[in-house]
Image (cartoon, helix red, strand yellow):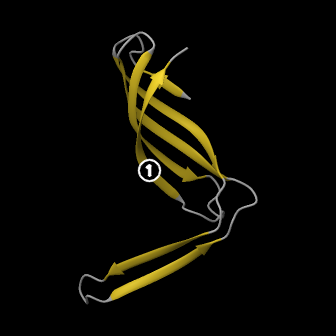
Amino acid sequence: MRYWLLSTHKLSPYLGLGYAAQWHPEFELKLEYVHEFTDEEEELSIEVPALSRPVSLFDFNAGLRYRFFRRLSLQTGAFYQFKIDTEQPGIPRFWGLKSSVMYEF
């Protein structure tokens, strides 16, 4: 779900809220870091099993749409997703950037 501010203008910002579901195979997370004061290297490994049901995520997003022509536009924005059920295995929260070229019917 997105709310377009100034939807009739050529440059239009938006705010969004949504739901995302992810299925994933088994994977392993490896973390390596160096302690700043002691210069000791540490490594942590977490194995995440495959899921039989999807991970449910809330999705918040915001960005801009630039309309080239009546039906063609470029959209770019940022998103932040976090798990609804924190007991489910997997990455608890993540964010990113995405861009797309859109053709509206």
Question: Which of the 4 image quadrants contains residue 37?
Answer: bottom left
Q: What residue is at 45 percent from the left and 13 percent from the top?
A: 71
Disc 1 marks a residue whose amino acid type is Trp
Above-or-below relation of 88 to 8: below
Above-or-below relation of 91 to 4: below
| Quadrant location of the C terminus in the rendered image | top right
Q: What residue is at 70 percent from the left and 53 percent from the top?
A: 54
Above-or-below relation of 19 to 12: below
Q: Is residue 18 left or right of residue 9?
A: right
Q: How many marks?
A: 1
- Percent x, y of residue 3: 49, 24
Q: What residue is at 57 percent from the left and 45 percent from the top?
A: 58
Is residue 20 or residue 98 the one in the foreground? 98
Question: Which of the 4 image quadrants contains residue 89?
Answer: bottom right
| Quadrant location of the N terminus in the rendered image | top right
Is residue 5 or residue 50 the one in the foreground? 50
Is residue 67 or residue 94 the one in the foreground? 67
Q: What residue is at 47 percent from the left and 54 percent from the top?
A: 94
- Percent x, y of residue 78: 40, 41
Q: Is residue 88 left or right of residue 82?
A: right
> Which residue corresponds to mark 1?
95
Is residue 1 or residue 48 the one in the foreground? 48
- Percent x, y of residue 21: 65, 47
Above-or-below relation of 47 to 93: below
Task: Name, please, the residue furthest toward the left.
Answer: 37
